[in-house]
Image: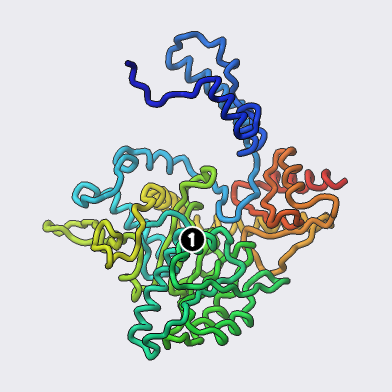
Amino acid sequence: MNSFRYIPASIEEIKKIYKFIGIKDKKELFYKIIGDIHLIEGKELDFMPDQMDELSLYKYFSDINDKLRSSGSIPVFAGAGIYDHYVPSAVDAIISRAEFYTPYTPYQPEVSQGTLMALFEFQSMLASILQMDTVNASMYDGAESLAEAVLMSLRIYRQNRQTGSDVGNSKKIKILVSKSVNPIYIEVVKTFIKDLDIVIEFTDIDPKKGYTNAAHLKEKLQENKNICAFIVQQPNYFGIIEDLEIIEKIVHSEKSASSSNPHLIVCSSEPFSFGVIAPPGFYNADIFAGEGNSFGNYMNFGGPLLGLFAAKKEFIRQMPGRITGKSKDDKNQDAYLFILATREQHIRRQAATSNICTNNSLNALRAAVYLSLCSKEGFKEISLLNLKLSHILCEKLIDTDLFSLKYTGNFYNEFVIEINNKKMNASEYINEMMKKGILAGISLEDGGNAVLIAVTEKISIKDIDNYVNRAVELFS
């Protein structure tokens, strides 16, 4: 019997599947997933000979690929956590080297020095960008990193409470979260804490400015006890830059029931912003949890991503994941190794601080290569370019009088506009713009008129002008 990698479905079975899920063909299936794209039909391959040499086969499919690229390459103005940044060819070339690409996990440091060195440099560069004391060797993604940050804060809080004045306090522990935090991140956090004795409460945002309402935050901290942390996103989900200076003073000046300050957890889905605005470490953040996909990784239809995690040095023993360190071997040469590995596989279960089974080392390596290519000055230039381009598009859209700015607070590379014309809501607007070859943004709510728009360095002035012109055409 022949050995098959997989057993394909027959034509009859495929028809049954289509009928069961309520579609007629594969084009309709893919349309539901990624819209109207050109698919290679079987009939396009019918005239191919049974055998082709490698060069002929390569040329044939290259021609098909060129057609797909020309019809499917569109400017992306969607963000909300994953951004369309340019990835230099050198990143793919370096990361494709066998010694980087093939290892699973560097369990044996003596044969994994290259990978460990790259992870050490990744941590060092991120520590510099974030101005945080300690960075680990990566997590799954930004949402999971935030969930782990909440669990870490909870562990520290309980540890302090056991030695504090309120021993035996049975009240539920609370986490305060700004309503400007990515809602997808919050859903992941809720999943992680579902079976724990912990409650999430939200603080309002300023309806005009779009950032966290500092007065409401202070009120919440004064009214509630047993609060172990406050979560804020920088820049927030709407692209608005939060005033972390005021937030930090409020959070760290309010005593919780354990006679200790609540932790300030800062998360971010666009760390490029820290080339322009002050990073979380500058504002005395206790824990940082972010998304690092912007650094040398593609959007990849939403994954795999790259989780970033950092904390103050006094919390290092409570950090999840692994930390790579630099030492000396018996010949006094540089040697790299894991100096902290807190998952269950490495230490006894009750002492583990994380149940994460692996990390995204390959994506972290990509980030290390990318940041090395950027240099400090290049990082700032890219960050500033994102800022400038987004403001140019925003101003041009507002000047048409077809849109209004929903939040007037300072923003980085993302902003929210509202459609003034009532004949079209946000979802309809995005669909119509897609027909014109532009991914115009993300609808913030079903049936609403608010569109979240992101701009990166891949967007040119020509793309911006084209966006504005096509939008004007829709309403003319």
Q: Quadrant of the N terminus?
A: top left
Total numbered labels: 1
Q: Nearer the viewer, residue 24 or 429?
A: 24
Is label 1 in a helix, a strand or a loop? helix
Could you tell me the amino acid type at mark 1? Answer: Thr
- Across and down, in percent, residue 351 comes to 27, 67
To which residue does mark 1 refer? 191
Examine the rendered structure and indicate whether residue 143 appears above or below residue 29: below
Please identify the residue farthest to the right as the structure is shown. Answer: 476
Q: Residues within 10 Å of mark 1 (few under 14, many from 20)?
A: few
Q: Quadrant of residue 168?
A: bottom left
User: Which is nearer the eye, 115 or 79?
Assistant: 79
Q: Position of residue 66 (x, y in %)?
A: 58, 27
| Image: 254 above or below 450 | below
Q: Nearer the viewer, residue 423 or 199?
A: 199
Who's the residue at 52% across and 81% down the image?
Answer: 251
Find residue 61 and report its horizontal and vertical position in percent. 52, 21
Relative to 178, 167 lies left or right: left
Q: Is residue 377 visible?
A: no
